[in-house]
Structure formats: structure tokens, C-alpha cells
């Protein structure tokens, strides 16, 4: 059980003089100074009419300011970090859907989110770094108009929503996942317990801070025990070992594709590894090939801890133990919430039986926002259905065997096929489209689409990809678009995503 039920409590418990945030070529920021930055930001937001329960969209580059700003916004209001790589249409959808009251960008930003926020009438706040240390910042309001102070000011409480993220669905638009302070503090504690994190640990964060993995495992878990986080500008395999030399970390967490890029360069950096020994390496967000686990452990001389997480669980659900049996190919033991296997009728299954992985616990969201249908489908007898198929041994080790739904998992980035369908359907030559995943040796899955053109119209895959690229973030754009006379259908005449890659000769 977490010692803390909200982020203001979590921050207040850490020693003022210990280092909280670090970054390349920057002075460190101590916990006492981080608290001051957070308090000043809360007072500023409250003065601009933004308080508890108000949603603040954040479009900031990875780094210490994003880390500190996320904590500050969550302590005062509700943080809604967005991928800076989104296109204008995506920003408009997400900001409208989450009912954002304000947008925070860095000073001098040219993000398309700015014009969207202005069109939607959001307060537009600019973040400027200060010299106090890595992550320290001030906020200013571009509009400078008078705003009524927030009626619900002051520090956030345990039941308040700390964080809102969207998750993709295959049969509906992306769903809003609200996570309370209690949810995120419980999950941070779960990660900290699994890894035995302490105040002497320094984590090297290469994960994006608009994603649940980076926010909880990379940031809040070490903050919960007074540890330090070395915040990089984002993953760069060419800079990883230079950051390692500067940070002298005891651990890092990443997705398998990042680990693969790192281990490929480990041979030429043996001296850096020897001089900066890691206590462990963590992997989550998608399955890690056992061969890569062996390579990493051999290269770094440290155990690789594979874990299993998802947005609705505020990240961690299961983890291989740090001290105990680790099983390559398994995501380990329940590590926070209860984990079970359920059949389609809602009955829990005995060990070694394949079914849907279900969870319940303090870290699990209370439900999707304004989506009764999704909640009816997602919750059964108090258990949350993950949508993942798996099996659990009598010892409690969980192995994922596939996804029940059709979300494409491209190296840990979850993509809704329907969202891609709808963009391609806007092309004047397209009559029918089915987006689906096909196997990829490094990313796990890549995005493809099968398209039928309107009679008398012409378009090729290149043209359609370029069209999609103007309206979708790069990772969502199909790498293959097949123009067909007819898309294969299932027995009932329905278009089916599952199995389509195999039917069309793309493996699987």
C-alpha cells in the first residue's frame, strides 16, 4: 500500500536538500526547490482561474521542465500531456474531447497546438526555464487578459483527477482515462516496491513524458522515495552512453525497441558500462524477445526486469521480481493490483488456462469518462478486463499470448485502426479501408491498410500515405497501403482486421 494518496503529500515527504531532477549540462534541482516551483505554479494557475478539476493540456518537449510541469499541474489541476508530434487535427480532437481549459507550451514554441488553442478559446500559457536548476520554470499568460481566480484553488486531494490520457479503441473513438491521485500514487509505489528503489538511486529517463510508462515508472516512482531522475530530451541511441557517463545512473526503464538499439551499441561502450554499473534494467510496454533480454544482461551485467502495464492501471500490473525467479517471455507476478484470468462468461479460470487477463486494485481507473458502453464492457464483477489474452501458472507468473482486440502495438505506441480508417476515408479516391497491424521484427507490429478505390478514381499507396501524413502523427501513418479490388471478408460478410495481414501475405 502506498504511503501517499496524493502528489502534494508525496512531494512534501522528501528531504529538501536531496536532488530531485537532473539533466544534461544543467545544475541539479533539489526537492525543496522543486516544491517551491510547484507551489508558485499552483498559485499562478489558481490566479488565472485554473484549479482542482480543471484540465490543462501540455505540449512540451521531453526534459526536466516537462517533468516538473507535469507534477506542478497535477498538484493544482488535472494534467493532460499530449504528444508534441500530433498534427493540428489531432490536437483539436484531444483538447476538445478532454475539455481543456488551458494549454501550456514552451516559450517560443511553433506547435500547431497553439493555433488550435486560440481557436478553441483556451488560456494559452508559456513556460520559461529559470536558472534555479534543471526543471525550474515560470509561467506567463500570452493573452494577459484578466481572469477570475479559481474557486477550487489550493493543493490537490486524493480523490481529485491528477492525470488524463486517451487510450485507443478499435470499434470506437479514443477513450478518456481519468487517473486519480490515489491511482497514480499507488502505481508509483507498486513500481518502487518491485524495484526496491531508494533515495540513493538515480534513474536515467529516456521515456516520453506524455506516456503512462514514463510518467509513472520514469518519474513518480523515484520521486516517491526521494530518488533522482536524470531527464533526457528523449530517446537517442547515439547519445545514450554519453548520458550514462554524465548521469551515473543505477537503473533505466525503456521499451524493447529502445533496449535493442542500446544493446546494439554496447560493444563499443564497454568502458562506460564498466565505470557506471547498473543495479538493474527495466522493460515494459510491449513484450521483450528473450534473445534481447540475454544480450542486455550479458552486455550490462545487470538483471533485466520485464514488467506489464497499461494506461487504465496507471501503468504497472505485473513484474518479474528483482530478487527471485525471472522468466524470459513472462511479464512476471502480480505487482500491485490483483491479477487473474477470466473467461468470456466472467468466471475466473484455474492456473495454466488461457483467457483474458483481468485486474483490480487501488491503481486501476474507476472507469472511462462519459462512456457507459465502454465501462459495461470493461468491468465484470469488479474486475477490469485488459483486452489482453494470457495464461497464469500455479506460481502466479503471467504470460501474454495475444490481444483480444485489434489495437496495433507499434513498439509500445498503441494505435486505433479506426482513427486511421477515418483519415484515409476522407481521401476523395477511397471507397473502403481497413487498417490493421502486421508483424515487424523490431517494433512487434507495424501499421498497414487495405484500400478499395472509388470507381473511376486512381491513387497509389505513396499518395495515400502522404495524405495520411498531413493529418496523423508519424507513428500512426501506415507503412504499407495495399490497393485492392476487394478486401477479404469473414464468414458473416464483415470486414475483419484480425488475420488480414496473413491473408494478404504480410506474415502473421
Image (spheres, rainbow, N blue to C red):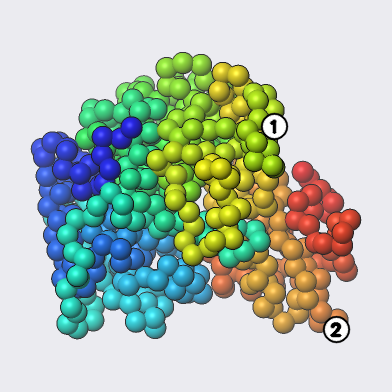
x then y, percent, for residue 61: 35, 58
Q: What element carries label 1?
A: loop
Of 426 and 134, nearer the camera is: 426
Q: Is residue 159 above or below residue 139?
A: above
Is 105 left or right of 140, judged from the image as shown? right
Which residue lies at the image location 38% right of the left edge and 34% below the top edge?
191
x then y, percent, for residue 436: 71, 56
Label 2 close to label 1 by CB (< 8 Å): no
x then y, percent, for residue 432: 78, 71
Label annotation for residue 337: none
Q: Is mark 2 on a helix, strand or loop?
A: loop
Which residue lies at the image location 45% right of the left edge and 35% below the top edge?
337
Is 219 left or right of 349, judged from the image as shown? left
* Within-10-Å neighbours for mark 1: few <14, some 14–19, many 20+: some
Q: In this view, does 317 lie above or below 57?
A: above
Q: Nearer the viewer, mark 2 or mark 1?
A: 1
x then y, percent, for residue 70: 30, 55
| On-image quarter of the N terminus | top left
Is 147 left or right of 417, judged from the image as shown? left
| Total labels drawn | 2
| On-image quarter of the C terminus | top right
**Alpha carbon distance from label 2 to label 1:** 48 Å
- Quarter assignment of residue 395: top right
Which residue lies at the image location 75% right of the left edge and 56% below the top edge?
497
Query: Which residue is label 2 attached to?
Result: 456
Can residue 301 be seen?
Answer: yes
Query: Which residue is label 1 attached to?
Result: 354
Which residue lies at the image location 61% right of the left edge and 27% below the top edge?
392
First in sequence: mark 2 or mark 1?
A: 1
Amino acid at each position: 500500500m502506498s504511503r501517499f494518496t496524493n502528489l502534494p503529500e508525496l512531494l512534501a515527504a522528501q528531504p529538501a536538500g536531496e536532488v530531485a531532477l537532473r539533466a544534461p549540462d544543467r545544475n541539479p534541482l533539489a526537492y525543496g526547490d522543486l516544491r517551491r516551483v510547484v507551489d508558485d505554479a499552483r498559485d499562478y494557475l489558481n490566479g488565472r482561474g485554473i484549479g482542482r478539476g480543471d484540465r490543462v493540456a501540455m505540449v512540451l518537449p521531453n526534459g526536466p521542465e516537462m517533468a516538473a510541469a507535469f507534477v506542478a499541474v497535477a498538484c493544482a489541476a488535472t494534467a493532460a500531456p499530449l504528444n508534441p508530434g500530433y498534427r493540428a487535427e489531432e490536437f483539436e480532437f484531444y483538447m476538445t474531447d478532454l475539455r481543456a481549459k488551458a494549454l501550456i507550451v514552451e516559450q517560443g514554441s511553433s506547435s500547431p497546438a497553439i493555433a488550435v488553442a486560440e481557436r478553441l478559446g483556451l488560456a494559452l500559457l508559456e513556460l520559461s526555464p529559470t536558472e534555479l536548476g534543471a526543471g525550474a520554470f515560470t509561467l506567463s499568460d500570452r493573452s494577459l487578459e484578466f481572469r477570475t481566480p479559481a474557486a477550487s484553488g489550493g493543493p490537490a486531494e486524493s480523490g481529485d483527477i491528477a492525470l488524463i490520457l486517451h487510450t485507443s479503441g478499435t470499434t470506437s473513438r479514443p477513450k478518456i482515462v481519468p487517473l486519480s491521485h490515489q491511482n497514480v500514487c499507488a502505481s508509483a509505489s507498486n513500481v518502487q516496491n518491485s524495484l526496491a528503489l531508494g533515495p540513493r538511486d538515480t534513474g536515467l529517463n529516456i521515456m516520453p513524458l506524455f506516456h503512462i510508462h514514463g510518467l509513472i515508472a520514469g518519474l513518480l516512482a523515484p520521486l516517491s522515495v526521494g530518488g533522482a531522475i536524470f531527464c533526457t530530451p528523449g530517446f537517442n541511441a547515439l547519445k545514450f552512453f554519453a548520458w550514462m557517463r554524465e548521469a551515473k545512473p543505477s537503473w533505466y526503464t525503456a521499451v524493447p525497441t529502445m533496449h535493442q538499439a542500446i544493446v546494439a551499441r554496447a560493444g563499443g561502450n564497454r568502458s562506460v558500462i564498466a565505470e557506471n554499473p547498473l543495479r538493474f534494467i527495466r522493460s515494459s510496454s510491449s513484450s521483450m524477445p528473450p534473445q534481447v533480454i540475454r544480450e542486455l544482461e550479458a552486455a550490462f551485467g545487470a538483471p533485466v526486469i520485464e514488467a506489464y502495464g497499461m494506461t487504465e492501471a496507471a501503468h504497472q500490473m505485473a513484474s518479474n521480481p528483482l530478487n527471485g525467479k525471472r522468466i524470459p517471455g513472462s511479464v512476471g507476478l502480480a505487482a500491485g493490483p490483483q491479477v487473474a484470468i477470466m473467461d468470456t462468461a466472467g468466471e475466473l479460470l484455474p492456473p495454466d488456462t488461457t483467457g483474458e487477463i483481468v485486474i483490480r486494485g487501488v491503481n486501476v481507473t474507476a472507469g472511462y469518462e462519459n462512456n457507459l458502453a465502454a465501462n459495461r464492457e470493461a468491468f465484470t464483477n469488479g474486475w477490469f478486463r485488459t483486452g489482453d489474452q494470457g495464461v497464469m501458472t500455479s506460481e502466479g507468473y503471467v504470460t501474454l499470448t495475444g490481444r483480444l482486440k485489434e489495437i496495433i502495438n507499434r513498439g509500445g505506441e498503441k494505435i486505433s485502426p479506426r482513427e486511421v480508417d477515418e483519415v484515409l476515408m476522407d481521401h476523395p479516391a477511397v471507397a473502403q479501408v481497413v487498417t490493421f497491424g502486421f508483424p515487424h521484427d523490431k517494433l512487434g507490429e507495424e501499421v498497414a491498410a487495405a484500400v478499395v478505390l472509388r470507381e473511376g478514381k486512381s491513387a497509389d499507396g505513396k499518395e495515400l500515405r502522404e495524405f495520411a501524413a498531413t493529418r496523423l502523427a508519424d507513428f500512426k501513418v501506415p507503412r504499407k497501403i495495399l490497393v485492392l479490388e476487394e478486401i477479404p471478408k469473414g464468414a458473416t460478410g464483415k470486414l475483419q482486421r484480425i488475420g488480414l495481414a496473413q491473408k494478404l501475405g504480410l506474415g502473421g
